Image (cartoon, rainbow, N blue to C red):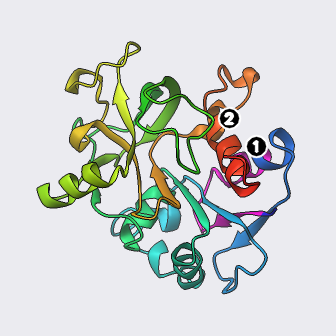
Amino acid sequence: MRFGVVVFPGSNCDRDCYHVIKEVMEEPVEYIWHKEKSLSGFDALILPGGFSYGDYLRTGAIARFSPIMPAVMDFAQAGGLVLGICNGFQILLEAGLLPGAMLRNSSLKFICQPVFLKIQRNDTPFSNKFKSMQVVKIPIAHGEGNYYCDPRTLQEMKDNGQILFTYCSADGEETMEYNPNGSLANIAGIMNGKGNVLGMMPHPERYSEDILGGRDGFNIFASMINWLKGVG
């Protein structure tokens, strides 16, 4: 089993993701520079957070054209596990691997704080270590996390079970009061139709060790490992 962390110019959470996989999960992992064109030998990819290409033009819009992205798209279409975190989520949207788009936070401010999420399903490669409808705490750090899609796409995602994480209260209440960025339907994370690609705005790598104040993010990576080992 081998994880790859894709590094774009401006990525700044790549080392955090690498640390979690190597030191916390104790699994093989390598950095993948954005100019690479092959993903041979990898079983799972992480597109980390940060400000790829300085977020010039639009978040993820330039990174989507990096040399590595055709290989990422082929990897995803072949069923490989792909996790996009924050800016990684934005890149997956721009690449068309996930539906919808990101808008500026409704407050027009950068937000960095822990939030509560509800796990909508626990039968996926990214959530099998959780309980269904479990409420967890994972931090966010973004200025453009306001997820949007058209009504038809939203209904399709609901029908297909593609909405995996939603913002909520500590008691699981899903209202705009507990929506930090104005995201449509309180969406914090979505999957593609096959369920092998996940984009999420919260940062699980920042809540995967007790020393960081919480471990709820640990189970996302543990779920991926379970799935790859055939026990998820």
**Quadrant location of the N terminus?**
bottom right
Does the rendering let one see residue 103? Answer: no
Q: Position of residue 184 (x, y in %)?
A: 22, 43
Q: Which three-letter amino acid code belongs to the residue tagged 1?
A: Val
Indicate left or right for 126 with 16 as reference.
left
Q: In this figure, which residue is indicated by the disc labeled 1?
A: 20
> What segment is highlighted magenta in the picture?
3-20
Vertical side of 191 occupied by 80: above or below = below
Mark 2 or mark 1, whichever is nearer to me: 2
Q: Position of residue 84 (x, y in %)?
A: 53, 57
- Label 1: few (<14), some (14–19) or many (≥20) C-alpha neighbours in 10 Å: many
Indicate left or right for 103 with 214 as reference.
left
C-alpha distance separating marks 2 and 1: 8 Å
| Residue 2 figure quarter | bottom right
| Mark 2, secondary structure of its residue | helix
Vertical side of 139 occupied by 51: above or below = below
